[in-house]
Image (cartoon, grey):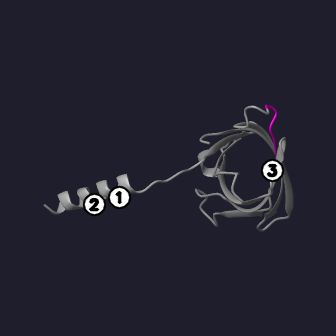
Amino acid sequence: MKFNKILFVAFLLTISVNCFSQISVTSYSIYSLGISTSQNKTISGELKTFANRSVDDLLFEVDVFYNFKPSDFHRFSVGVGLNSELFAGSDPINAFTIPVQLEIYPLQDFKRFSVLFELTPQFIIEDDVNVRSLWGLRYTFGN
């Protein structure tokens, strides 16, 4: 009987809550994949994985971006992030990042597809500063 009440409440919540989301997928260069929230909002987030490695060296990065007002042909974003090796035996935090992105819309009638360039200073813990350069293709789902 208690299970039926929980199921009924869960059913009411699913029919009464509207949720809208816009997610995009980016393939960076040849070794990284990113999933991000809507860039149409002022603040967005992105989760990247650098997957061309062994499982022990797999890198993940979480970034939060400030998106400047887009033009008809491009969008500019600046963010902060944390690069991590989750499966490493020692300290999982690898670096602090400041990604700078330029997103270009090559097809004006189809803005779901874009070309992305990223330049990121990485402040590596227990090491020096590194500058990472990525380019990629982004497809945005939703409106």
Residue 16 at x, y percent in the picture: 38, 56
SS at circle 1? helix
Q: Nearer the viewer, residue 41 or 30?
A: 41
Residue 120 among magenta residues: no
* Above or below for 78 versus 113: below
Real-space CA distance between mark 2 and mark 3, rounded to the nearest whole angstrom: 42 Å
Residue range in magenta is: 103-107
Q: Quadrant of residue 124?
A: bottom right
- Is there any visible trace of residue 62 in the rendered image? no
Kind of residue at disc 3: Pro
Q: Is residue 141 above or below residue 61?
A: above
- SS under mark 3: loop
Which residue, given by chain and number where applicable, does mark 3 sit on? 70
- The residue depicted at 85 percent of the width and 57 percent of the height is 130
x and y percentages locating residue 67 in the rendered image: 76, 57
Q: Residue at x 20, y 61 (%)?
A: 5
Quadrant location of the C terminus in the rendered image: top right
Q: Which residue is mark 1?
A: 13
Q: Is residue 4 left or right of residue 112?
A: left
Distance between the alpha carbons at the discs numbered 1 and 3: 36 Å
Residue 44 position within the rendered picture, expressed as x and y whole percent measured from the top left:
68, 57
**x and y percentages locating residue 65 in the rendered image:** 73, 59
Q: Which mark is residue 69?
A: none
* Number of residues whose C-alpha sits closer than 10 Å to that of mark 1, classed few (under 14), some (14–19) or many (20 or more): few
Residue that protrudes farthest toward the left in the picture:
1
Nearer to us in this view, 33 or 9: 9
Tell me the crowding category of disc 3: few under 14, some 14 to 19, or many 20 or more residues within 10 angstroms, Cα based. some
Q: Is residue 59 left or right of residue 16?
A: right
* Amino acid on which the number 2 mark rests in the picture: Val
Of the image marks 1 and 3, the number of the one nearer the N terminus: 1
Q: Residue at x 59, y 61 (%)?
A: 89
Question: In the picture, residue 123 is in which quadrant?
Answer: bottom right
